[in-house]
Amino acid sequence: MKRLITLGEINIFDAINDPRESIRRMKVIELLSAIPGVGKARATLIMERRNISPTRRIGGLGHLQLKALGKELAVAKVDPIRGKLIVISGPGGVGKSTITAQLRNDPRFWISVSATTRDPRPGEREGVDYLFLTPEKFQEMIETGEFLEWAEFAGNRYGTPRAPVEEWRTLGKHVILEIEIDGARQVRSREAGATLIFIAPPSWEELVRRLTSRGTDSPERRAARLALAEQEMAAASEFDAILVNDDVEGLIEQLVSLATA
Ligand code: 5GP
């Protein structure tokens, strides 16, 4: 059934109206994702917008939900205004991830999930904080052109998978990349319309304090991070805007207005 939908041979409503138990037990999200031109991201968005639980099965759809789905699919051909690409960069330890975490629940934004070859830190989750890849898999993705940008940082590789960025922008979400400086430079040269935002610490002393208080790094790694941070601070002038991270709330406000301007 899913394959037939993908091939465009049957309409999703054929599936919705099919009395067979095997079809009634299929997840709505799977069938929606299989529709040509819809895909996983748009299917998820439609379900969220219509308050349909991601685990809902075809047979469990209520009348109103069916009607809502019908409306969504009728207009699915109309593309929303493409979302912007926003790069948030700055030295390690400046608090970039705290900032992006605050935007996670804002439906106007989608925070890109990077791939990395580094090991997960305690509490980090696969597919949420990062895609944790082997060096071989990372290399393969470089060779197949799957990264929008990638860079080496403190002995590990980090990269932004291109496909989800495109998918979410097509759905009208502003996509946020939280990346280091080399990656930001690559985005600048590849995506002329991207907005590059530099997050600066209140002072160099404060940055050193934040970087050295992280208990998970070895002394060598810490020294490397400090040296890199110094280089990164020197790149601030290449950015479209510099925001100082002395008050997270205020910074988020500035960021949102820059992003949605
Ligand atoms: P951490 O290992 O502390 O999570 O991240 C180290 C650095 O890598 C941070 O400056 C972070 O912003 C950057 N980073 C994370 N993901 C990416 C990515 O996809 N591309 C690039 N270029 N840098 C990234």
Image: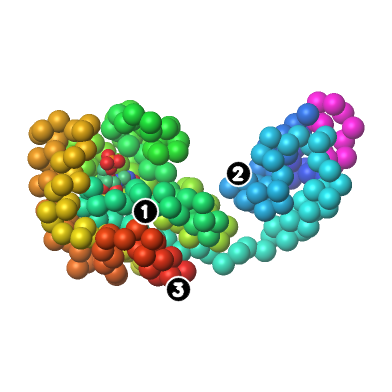
Q: Earlier in the sequence, mark 1 or mark 3?
A: 1
Q: How many marks?
A: 3
Q: Position of residue 194 (x, y in %)?
A: 38, 65
Residue at the location (45% across, 73% down)?
Answer: 261
Residue at the spot of label 3: 261
Q: Position of residue 107 (x, y in %)?
A: 55, 56
Q: Is residue 198 visible?
A: no
Q: Quadrant of ligand 1?
A: top left
Q: Earlier in the sequence, mark 2 or mark 1?
A: 2
Tag 2–tag 1 contact (CB < 8 Å): no
Most foreground residue, 218 or 89: 218
Q: Earlier in the sequence, mark 3 or mark 2?
A: 2
Q: CA distance from mark 2 to mark 1?
A: 27 Å
Q: Amino acid at mark 1?
A: Ile
Q: Main secondary structure of the magenta part?
A: helix
Which residue is the extreme one toward the top?
A: 22
Whether residue 88 is situated above or below residue 242 in the rendered picture: above
Residue at disc 2, CB closer than 8 Å to ligand 1: no
Element on which disc 3 rests: loop
**Which segment is the magenta one?**
14-24
Q: Residues within 10 Å of mark 3 (few under 14, many from 20)?
A: few
Q: Nearer the viewer, mark 3 or mark 2?
A: 3
In what quadrant of the picture does the N terminus appear? top right
Q: Amino acid at mark 2?
A: Lys
Residue at the spot of label 2: 40
Q: CA distance from mark 3 to mark 2?
A: 28 Å
Residue at the spot of label 1: 99
Q: Amino acid at mark 3?
A: Ala
Whether residue 79 is situated above or below residue 52 in the rendered picture: below
Q: CA distance from mark 1 to mark 3?
A: 19 Å
